[in-house]
Image (spheres, grey):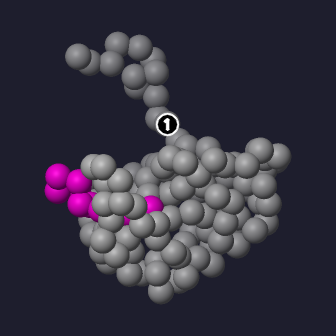
Amino acid sequence: MANSTRLGQAQVYATLPAVDLDRARRFYSQTLGLEPVEDTSDGLTYELGQGSRFLLFASAGKASGDHTQIAFSTPDVAETVEELRSRGVQFEEYDLPGLKTVDGVADMDGRRSAWFHDSEGNLLGVTQPQ
């Protein structure tokens, strides 16, 4: 079924809370190698491949970190995990029904994924489509 509303044609982007926006900026810059394209009163906007964007905004509330809040699609999860580990990122290990990681990477019917927390407690994922 085709999207028949204006929302079905809208571009979307994620918003991530940051208790300490300066600390978050340092993490995203120094650890992930990402720089904001905009720094406004709304927060820090990052632009990535194919027009995707996300916003880090100052928030008094804390991220739950209980679910993936943003996922980065990558052609090779193992290479991405290795690169991020060399920058100090610690990946989560899971051993749950239907989700088990080995050295931080889960293979879910051919789709490989890994997860880590940013400086603010947001759970971020890297995923390799089938």
Q: What residue is shown at x 65% (from left), y 71% (from top)?
A: 27
Q: Which residues are magenta?
A: 106-115
Above or below, comparing residue 61 to residue 45 in the picture = above
> What kind of residue is marked 1?
Val
- Residue that label 1 marks: 12
Q: Quadrant of residue 88?
A: bottom right
Q: What residue is shown at x 58% (from left), y 76% (from top)?
A: 31
Q: Quadrant of the N terminus?
A: top left
Q: Is residue 50 left or right of residue 22?
A: left
How crowded is the residue under tag 1: few (<14 C-alpha within 10 Å), some, or many (20+)? few
Q: What residue is shown at x 50% (from left), y 64% (from top)?
A: 116
Q: Is residue 28 left or right of residue 3?
A: right
Q: Residue furthest top?
A: 4
Instruction: Using the rendered image of the protein, determine whether residue 35 is visible from the camera's viewpoint.
Output: no
Residue 59 falls inside the magenta stretch: no
- Relative depth, front residue between 54 and 124: 124
Q: Is residue 62 left or right of residue 96?
A: right
Above or below, comparing residue 28 to residue 127 in the picture = below
Name the spot of residue 122 as percent of width and height, x first.
Answer: 60, 55
Instruction: Using the rendered image of the protein, determine whether residue 94 is visible from the camera's viewpoint.
Output: yes
Residue 113 falls inside the magenta stretch: yes
Name the spot of residue 22 as percent of width and height, x first.
Answer: 79, 66
**Helix, strand, or loop for circle 1?**
loop
Q: How many marks?
A: 1
Above or below, comparing residue 84 to residue 125 in the picture = below
Q: What residue is shown at x 40% (from left), y 22% (from top)?
A: 8
Name the spot of residue 6 as percent of width and height, x first.
Answer: 45, 17
Q: Quadrant of the C terminus?
A: bottom left
Q: Main secondary structure of the magenta part?
A: strand
Q: Residue furthest bottom?
A: 86
- Relative depth, front residue between 44 and 112: 112
Q: Quadrant of residue 93?
A: bottom left
